[in-house]
Amino acid sequence: MPTVPLWMALGAALPPHWSPIKVYFGITIILSIVGWGVLLQQAQNFIYKELDEFVNKGVRLNEKRGRLFE
């Protein structure tokens, strides 16, 4: 994703009477909120992958269904 056009668009979306420091911090906050969602999604995918491998290994070892989730 090209970052310079993104920064320009976000800078234009913020109020024009804000000082450059306020605009910078406003853009930083917006990008951090968006980035947090992406990071959370990656962490969830990692956890689900590990859980899936754990369950598949238990199934291959013929564990009882209730024991898989203890």
Image (tube, helix red, strand yellow):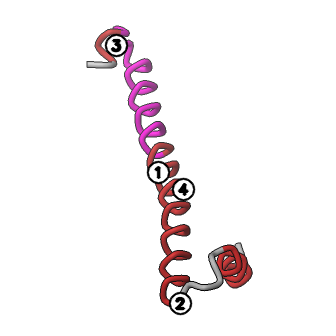
Q: Do tag 3 and tag 1 residues touch (Cβ < 8 Å)? A: no
Horizontal side, residue 1 vs residue 40: left or right? right
Q: Secondary structure at mark 4?
A: helix
Eye-nearest disc, 3 or 2:
2
Q: Which residue: 41% across, 33% down?
A: 51
User: What is the x, y in percent for residue 15?
Assistant: 63, 77
- Residue 16 screen position, x and y as percent: 65, 83
Q: Nearer the viewer, residue 18 or 8?
A: 18
Q: CA distance from mark 2 to mark 4?
A: 29 Å
Q: Residue at x 70, y 72 (%)?
A: 1
Q: Is residue 33 magenta?
A: no
Q: CA distance from mark 3 to mark 1?
A: 31 Å
Q: Amino acid at mark 4?
A: Val
The residue at which mark 1 appears reads as 40
**Mark seen at residue 7:** none
Question: For the residue carrying disc 2, how many other residues have a C-alpha within 10 Å: few (<14), some (14-19), or many (20+)?
Answer: few
- Which residue sits furthest left? 70
